[in-house]
Each structure stands twice: as structure tokens, then as C-alpha cells.
Amino acid sequence: MDHITRLAQRVLASVRETREFDRNVKLLLLTTTLNWVGQGIFAVVFNLYVLSMGIETDILGRILSTGPLAHAVASIPLGFLGEKIGHKSLFVAIYLIGGVSCLIQVATPNVSLMAAAAFFGGLALAGDFVMRLPFLATNAKESHHTRVFSLDSLLTSASFSVGALLAGYLPNLLLGLSPDLTTRYRYTLYLAGVLILSAMVPALMMTPRPRSRAKDKRISLSPYLWGIDRFTVQLAIIELFVGLTMGLIMPFMNVYFTYRLGTSREFFGTIAALAVLPVAIATALGPSVARRIGTVRAVTASRFVILACTLALALTNHGLLATAAYWGYRALFSMGASLWFSFAMGAAASRAKAAASAWLDITFWLGMGIAAWVTGRLLAVDNYRLPFYLASAAAVMAGLTTHVFMDSRNEPPAQQTIG
């Protein structure tokens, strides 16, 4: 009974703290919800929609690669742009461009226009990623930072899961509008675009904060390019392999389950939504593992253990076993990522933190973009296993480079702190 009482008290305290959040913070959390429900719908349905029109998977791979490549190219410039025009203006532009990008990708059968729209969608996602954390840090009280960042992360995962679940069932619910499956996919994707666009509304309601002299500061690329230190270069190399590990399989996971394993769209939508549970559990356990063996070794171990999941996905023909491997992959990846970012930001020199963060983002999305193009080509010749073998090799390289470059920085477990 005492445990229940204490739990209830913690919940009430969390609710009270949330009510005390700055209005801008609450509005940004609302944009998180709207945007990521739309992104969840789009992620589950778009590949199936494109393939239902008779477009080959190698062409789909080209379309899917443009967004990550845009993200890699735009991360640093968008950071400067946010300082120049202000976070509120950039958030409005982000959701406008992101929503219109989704709508154009659905409205046209022209592959070139789809790819161009996907590129602009990648720009929007990059802007959201680059601006979100600084905006929350600026607008939230320091005493609220832990709660705010945790809640934003939770809302992102939960909203994406809700969108994925809706995506599995909406096309059937729209049967009354059209008997044609491609048309029902299109209507579902229009809804996703409208939800992303609707995130503009809370962004427009934000109150602009007075900016420092950042508006008048000269832009210098030196800290990000020729001025980067050895540690940042090592982070970038490792993160490239991490991006390849994810990009070779994750953008096509719905195609793999539907076309290779023969499961239904509803099945994949449901398991994609439920993946939030093992992800949350693994992420919560990550700090305990790091306290026992050190953060670097916990990250390295997670990347090597991922190998078992990617190989299982390559070899199995059973939907339930593939589901377990998919959930394990997502959980280990999330746990490793949260510890990795904490370590990277803690270990980077003060003046190099911004560059380290930027290059982690750039090389991850560069790896994603290259990998999506490669997998699209392989699936075009019905080779569903090789992408998983390549992802396994990339995971091994991510683990090896983490060990070689960073193990000397692994603190004794008793001294380890996780941010």
C-alpha cells in the first residue's frame, strides 16, 4: 500500500510540475504530438503506397535516401538560421514545409517530384531536430530540464506509435470512400500531411523570446569543419556505421514484413506501435548497465548484441520470431543511443560540443541515406537477406570502432555517472 501511495504522490508531483511549464514549452510539446502522429502514419504507409502504384523498390530507395541526405547537408546551416530568424519563425517554416512535403509526395505519381519533396521533408526534420533541444533549454526553468526533455522524448515515441497503429487500420476504415487500396493509402497519407501541417498552429502561438546578439554574430564554419578536433572526427566515423546499421533495414521494415514474411499491414502497424514498450524498458535499464560496466562498454556491448537481431531477421521466415528480433533491435539501438549521446556530450571539450553534436547528426543521416539507396537496389532483385547481413557487418564495425576509439575513456563503473 505504501508503494502505491508513493507512486501516486510522484505522479501528482509530475503533473503539478508539468502544469508549471512555460507556455512555449507546452506549445512545443503539442507540436511534438501532432508532428509525430503524422510521421508515424507516413512511415508505415508510404512505402506500401509507392509499391502499390507499381514503382520498383530501387526507385523507392532513391526517394527514401533523399530525406536523410538533406538532413545531413542541412544540420549546420539550419542551426545558424535558427539563431538569425528566431526559433518561433523557424518552427512555423519547419511544419509548413514538412506538411507540404508529405502532401506533394502523395499527390504526384512523378518520381522526381516525390524525391524533391522528400528532400524538403528531410530539411524540415533536420530543422526540428536541431532547434528542439536548444528551444526547450532556453524556455524551460533549469529545475524543469530533466522532466521537459524526458517528456518530449516520451511524447515523440508515444505519438509515433499512435500514428503507426492508426496507419495499420485506417486504409480499411476508409473502404467506404474507395474500393481501390492505392486510393485509400493516398487518403491516409493526406491525413498524415495535414497533421504535420497542423503543428504550425501551436508554433504560431509561441511567444518570441528576445535574442542575444546572435543575430549580429558573424557565421563561422571553423568549429564545424577545419577546426574540429580528433575526438569529434572519431565520433563522426563511429556514427556513420551506426547510420548504416539502421538505414540498411529500418526504412524498409514494413516492406520486409509485408512482402517477405507475408504479414498484414495491420500486423506491422501494431508491432511497430508496441515497439515503444521494449524501447522504453531498455532505455530505462541502460543507466544501470552503464553503472556496472561503464558507459562506453555498455554502448559497445549493445552494438555487438544487435548482431543477433539482424541475423535473426535475415534468416527467419516466421512473423513472431521476426517481431521479437525487430523489438530487440529497436530496444538495443535506443538504449545504446541514449547512453552514447550522454557520453559524447560529456566527453567533448566545452568549445567542441556544438560541433560534436552536429557531426553526430550529419554522419548518422549520411549513413542512413546511402544505406536506403543500397537496400532499394537489393530489394529490386528480391534480395531480402543481404541488407540484414550488411547491417550486421555495419553493427560490428560500429562496435569495433567504439571499442578502439573510446574504450580508454571508459570510466571505472563505480565512478560512472549518466547524464
Image: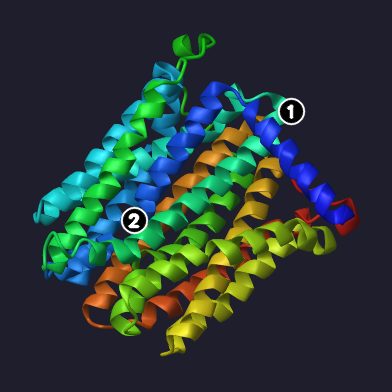
Q: 189 or 343, which lies in front?
A: 189
Residue 145 percent across, percent down from the top left: 67, 32
Q: Which residue is mark 2?
A: 41
Q: How is the image coloured?
A: rainbow
Q: Is residue 65 left or right of residue 129?
A: left
Q: Is residue 212 above or below residue 131?
A: above
Q: Residue at 39% of width from left, 42% of height from top? A: 35
In the picture, measured across the screen, residue 51 lies left or right of residue 31, that is: left
Q: Which residue is mark 1?
A: 143
Comparing 37 with 178, the one in front is 178
Q: Is residue 405 visible?
A: yes
Where is 137 relative to 323, above or below? above
Bin the neighbour count of mark 2 within 10 Å (Cα to Cα): few under 14, some 14-19, many 20 and up: many
Residue 93, label in figure: none
Q: Residue 188's spot in the image, x, y percent?
A: 24, 55
The quarter of the rendered structure image containing the N terminus is: bottom right
Q: Position of residue 51 (x, y in %)?
A: 19, 69
Residue depicted at 76% across the width and 53% down the height: 409
Residue type at tag 2: Ile
Left or right, 91 with reference to 113: right
The disc, 2 or 1, on the residue closer to the chain's N-terminal end is 2
Marks 2 and 1, how far apart at CA: 35 Å
Q: Is 173 left or right of 219, judged from the image as shown?
A: left
Query: Residue 265 occupies which quadrant of the picture?
Result: bottom left
Mark 1 falls on what kind of element?
Answer: helix
User: Circles 2 and 1: CB distance less than 8 Å?
Assistant: no
Residue count near mark 1 (Cα–Cα under 10 Å), binned few <14, some 14–19, many ≥20: few
Regarding mark 2 in the picture, which secondary structure is present there? helix
**Image location (x, y in percent) of residue 114:** 17, 51
Tag 1: amino acid: Ser
Quadrant showing the C terminus: top right
- Residue 378, by quadrant, is bottom left
